[in-house]
Structures are given as C-alpha cells and as structure tokens.
Amino acid sequence: MSDSCNLQAKISRRSFLFLSGGALALVAMPPELARAAAARGLSLVRVSYPRQKIGRLSALQLGRPVAFQYPHQHPNCSALLYKLGAPAGGGIGPDGDVVAFNNLCTHQGSPIPYFDAVNQVAGPCPLHLTTFDLTRHGMVISGHATDGLPQVVLELDGDDIYATGMMGLIFGFHNNEVIP
Amino acid sequence: MSSYIRQNRVPLPPPDAKVTTTACDYCVVACGYKVYTWPVGKEGGPKAAENAFNVDFPTSTLGWWISPNQHNIVSVNGQPHHVLVVPDNDATVVNLKGNYSIRGGTNALKAYNPDKPTRDRLLYPQIRVDGKLERVSWDTALDVMVAVSKHVLSKYGEMAWAMKTYSYEFFENTYAITKLAWGSINTAAFAQHDKPGMSSDTGGMDDAGIITFSASYKDYAAADVLFISGTDPFETKTVVFTSWMLGKKLIMVVPRRTAGVAYAEQNGDLHLPVIPGTDTILHLAINRIILENGWEDKEFIDRWVANSWEVDAGFGRGPRNTPWQWRTTWGQFQSNYKDYKEWLLKYEPAELEKAAATTGVPAEKIRKAAEMLTGAGGPRPKASFNFEKGNYWSHNYLNTASLAALGLLCGAGNRPGRVISRLGGHQRGWMAGAAYPMDKTPEKLPGRRRNQLDLDRWVMDGHVRFAWVIGNTWTGGQAASQFLAAALRRFTRENPNQVTSTNKDEIIATLLARVDSGGMVIVDSDIYPVEPINTELADIVLPAAQWGEHDVTRCNGERRLRLYSRFYDPPRRGET
C-alpha cells in the first residue's frame, strides 16, 4: 500500500482515474511514476471533473472527517475528507493517509453516519449494515452494496487539498459527469 | 490477469426496453428482480420520460438506483443487447422494496459475455481424444452415450449405470433427470450433489415430526427471539436477515465471530461460540435448565407432543410406522415426553458445568439462552429456531433431534412466529419424476428395511461402468475422499483403453473395451470447466444452459414458487 501512497503523493496532475489490472495504456506520466504504477498493476485515464479546493492538510485531525460537496452541488454528492492515520490506496500527504469518499452507501443511498477510526472503516450503514474499507479504495468489507464507496481523487498543492476527480459511480447517478 | 475497473456511468434503458421478471439465482432467499434488455446502440436519458424506469436521474438519497455491476452485454436472438438485472423495488414479499445482497445485486455479471470472465463457459459437446477435450457434434456425443449405456445395461445391469446430479437446479430438470435414471433406466446407483446417497439430511428433525422447510419469512418478523444455529444468515442469506430479522433478540450458535454475530453482540444479543461437534450437548444443557425450572411450554407439550398411549397407537409422525421405526426395529427405542424428561434430568453430560466444559460456551451464556427463549417464568416470548449446515451437516442425528426437542419445549411448532425450520442454502428445485428403486439397493439396515445405496462406495468397489455427472463436483462432495477421486481416475484415465480417434465408431469401440476391462466411462454436464471432474476425468463433456437462458421454476426457503424467465441466448455456437 505504501507504494501507491508515495505514487499518489507525487502526482500533481489533475483529473485521473485509478485502474487496477494494467489493461489500459499509461497516459502522460513521468517514467518513474509509470514504473511505480505498473509495479502496482495500476494505470491512469483522464476524465473531466472540476478542480476544487476542499481543505488544508494542516487543519486535518486524525479520525475527524470533514464534510464537503463534490463534484456537484447535489444532495447525493456529500463527501468526507479523512485523515486515517494509516496508509491508504489513493492517499495523499506525507503519510499517504489522507483520502476522501462520497458518503452515500452504494446499496440504497443512506448517508453513512459511522466512522470506525481504529479500523479505518466507514459504516456499518444503518439500513443494512454494509461496511467499507477506506484504506482500500472504499471496497466493501461486508454487507449488501455491489460497489465500493466512490473515492474522490485528491491532489496536494502546498498545504491545500484539491478534489480533482471521482473513482466509482455516485449513488443515484447514471453518469458522474452529467451535471444535475 | 483479471482487472476491476471502477465505472463512472451506467447505461439507462430507453422507454421501449423489454422488461422480464426473474428471481436471484444464488442463495435460498430468491429475491425478486426485473430484467431490462435493449439493443446495443440505443440508450435512455436521465429524464423520467426518457428511460424505461420512468425515473429522473440522479435519484434521491435513500431512493432507488442501479449500480454499474447490475449491467452487462448479452446476446438476444443473436444481436448484442444491454442488460440490467435490477432488484424489484415493487416487491411486497421476500426482498421488500427491492432489498438485495451483494450476490444478487451482481446477477447481471453471471450472464455469458465473451469479453468478461464468463468467457470460460462450456460452449459445445466435447470428447476426450488423446487426453484432450475435442469439440464434437451433439449427435456424436449422444450416439456414444447411447451405445455405451446400452452395452452397460445389457451386459452389467442397471446398477452399473450411475448418476450423480444436483438436487436443486430447477424442477423441470430434476424431474427429467429422475425420470430417466429412476424410471427409464431404473437404477439405484444415484446420488444428489451433497451426499453419497438418497438419505435424509436432518434425521432427528424428521423423526420429531418437523418439516424442515416449514417457516414463512413472516414468521421471523413475528418472532421475539431467534435461535440461529450453524449459520450466519447475514453473510449467507443476507436479505432474510436484514429484511426480516433485524431488531429481534438473537441467539447465534456459531463458532466464529462473523459479521452477523458482531451485529448481535453490539445489540446486546447472545453469541454461543460452540466448539464444532458439540451442539447436541449445548441443546441438552439448555433443555435441562428449562425442565429443571419448569419453564417449558406445558400447554403446548400437553396438546402436541405424543404421550405414551398416542405413541403406542401410532398417531402422528414419530411413533409407529415411521422412518425411524423402519431404520431400527418395531417397538425398540419407543419413548415419550415423560421418559425424555426423566432421562435428561439424570443425564450427566447435560449438567450445566459439564456441558460448559464440553461445548466451550460459558455456563452463564447457556443459562441466559434458556432465559431468553422461555421468558424464565415471566411472559413467554415467541421463540423460533433456525438451523443450517453447521448444525446438521455433521450428519450427527442427535444435533437435529436435540434441537427439535429444544424448540418443542419452548412451544415452537410451526405456529406464527414460533417455528422450527432450516434457513436453507440453495433454492429448492427437486421434483422426482419416478420413484427411487429401493428394491435395487443391496444395502440393508439391521431392521426390516433396505437402505439407500452409498454411491461413492459403490463406485470405489468397482460396480459402476457408466456415470453421468450433472452440475456438481462429486469428488468435492460431502463424504467424498481422495480415495474416491483416485478410484475415478483409475477407472477412467488410467485404464489402457483411451480414445485416440474422432471417428464415432472407433470411439464407441474403445469405450466398450474400457467398460469390459473393468473401467468406467464418465459423462459430465456443466456450465463451466470444473476440476477435476470434467477437466480431467470425464470422457464426454456436455454444455448446459443456466439461469436467464431458459424458463424455469423452483422454490425459495419459505416454499414460495419463483419463476425465472429467459432473457438472453444460451452461449451455444453452431449446432443446437
């Protein structure tokens, strides 16, 4: 996991998706990043999302998520910015532990009010108990949902944290990029 | 390399998309689904009038949605089509308001798509030539099967012709399978997927007079306390747990601290972490506490549990002329409630401290279970009793017999909210098209009756010359062994008579020589390559259609008939 964190920490380009499996071509990456990504079985493709400042690294506290809206001002686009205290896939910052996720359960769209800071887990969802691993791109640990929590792609610019894209379809949407 | 690409969109069906209904194919719950199919090249729009759901996108929080994993591309009448397999949010039974699990929610992904992992499907009949499966026509494959079968039946008799089949893959199929094997062939060399013979899974429960699939899901909602043994329904039959059981007091008898157990504990419910194999002692210890304190449901017992006169007169199930009498001898082991109570109160292994040591469950937890199930002299709660493989699949007769006694002591006997029932694993699709020829089986019990044949033993002893395996692993089945796998290998691959030609007559001649040299010919019908039964052992491999590829029926865990509509083409190429 730490490789991917370092990789993420270095990337300053906007608007990309993580793809595991390496089936797609690497796009516009410095060679050392491409090598690191290939070693992890990851590759990147571009989609267009707004670049939006969502917080400051120095203001984040362990286990105290910060709410923001992204990529649209739609109720379903409520997201949380976390400092997990453990390296995470897609994590930024010196410890690779700063991540952000849409906060609607991908089963039936309930906002998830619980965060288990000890285990870096979102959930259980109050409706049907689905839990999501925030260190592993929001994948389902247990429960009903058929997809992980959509992850907000982050970039660090000095102390400023920017949201630059989404990985995974947001609950209720048929297309993340269609502005409601 | 497999890859998982997170999708940021899902295609919407246009208003004229075709809608069919189905139920989920996976666990016993069989949630209701709707299937939308429409030709590739068209898509619906996000406005309600522009899509077949008649719903505006984005939908609201706590609303309804389709996940990208509910989409696939399939062939319909030879043309590529989008398909969405979507939980039925109109459902008023089973999966209320479109609840679904992570299994059923991904039903679309199991549809055949040559660009996805389902590309591994078996596509055409094959015969093993020079050790390698080669494509042949249906006519060739069936002609060889017929020739070998005729030879085996005429020279070695019906019992040399065997079948090992699933019990559940739709009523239509099991009816035809048993009509062939039991009726037309008339062989007792037959076993279902999960066990070596046609015996009961839950003998103790059957003998107590409990039909093991007796509950309706409404019963779980109507209960106050659920005793759940040998399964975590949250993990394995998810929707029955989250749609019908949440909020009930739970007593979960599971060795591991699974997700459902963790939920129960967080809610102040009870986890009995039983040492595997000691369920009987746990049940007896709870039963003994109940009887010692007079917490049993006396009114129910007086009315429904047979007394000595009723036992002797042969009323109801359990006394005379029932399976347990046939398996033993008439009149032996006759008992009634009074005998049972006297026996249990003297039975030392059921004493609380001894039982706690045996089962690994702390004494205070065993006592707490007895209190929760009966109300401990206060108002009596409605208690229901559910069990699954962890309890009964040891084939320990006493596990289910003692659990039936526990349920009956608590007044559970298939009345609303007070049921004793299996929760189920797979759906129920068994429909016998003929009677099992019990007169053919050479096995006999000490009493008067024959016993169903143990097919694995029959094979290992060299009595089988032809076997047709349908939709199961066999060598990985219950009570199967490396010895069985080695026997199958010895009678097939290690026999000197191996097919080296694609000429039908030569194939038949070789396989008849195999049979006459003491070997065996195996045919396997399945949807995927399965190690080792069709990849290594079978001489003939036949492809089958699956869920979504033909119209079929079966029942869920509350005996509700489910209909599964065909919505796309079976992945057959060339001949049909």
Image (cartoon, coloured by chain):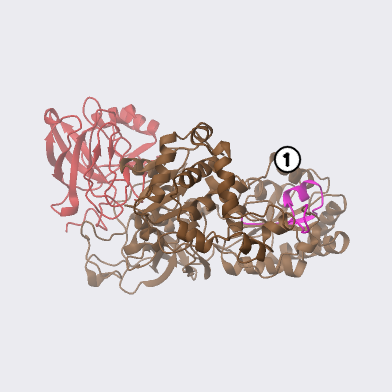
Query: Looking at the figure, which quarter contains the N terminus of chain A?
Result: top left
Going by the numbered disc 1, the residue's amino acid type is Phe
B103 or B350, which is in the foreground?
A: B350
In magenta segment, residue B452: yes
Q: Residue furthest bottom?
A: B16
Residue B371, image x, y percentages: 39, 45
Residue A175 in picture, x, y percent from top left: 25, 56
Give me the chain that's red: A
Residue that carries the numbered disc 1 in the rendered image: B483
The x, y position of residue B411, in whole percent, is 46, 57
User: In the picture, which quadrant includes the C terminus of chain A?
Assistant: bottom left
Label 1: how many Cα within 10 Å (few below 14, some 14–19, many 20+) = few
Report the magenta residues as a range.
Answer: B446-471
Q: Is residue A81 magenta?
A: no
Q: Quadrant of residue B95?
A: bottom left
Q: Is residue B127 above or below residue A114?
A: below
- Whether residue B527 appears in this view of the structure is no
Residue B155 in sight? yes
Name which residue lies at 41% across and 49% down: B373
Q: Residue at x 77, y 59 (%)?
A: B449
Of the pair B328 and B165, the residue shown nearer to us = B328
The residue tagged with tag 1: helix, strand or loop?
A: helix
Q: Chain of mark 1?
A: B
* Chain represented in brown: B
Residue B23, percent across and down?
44, 64
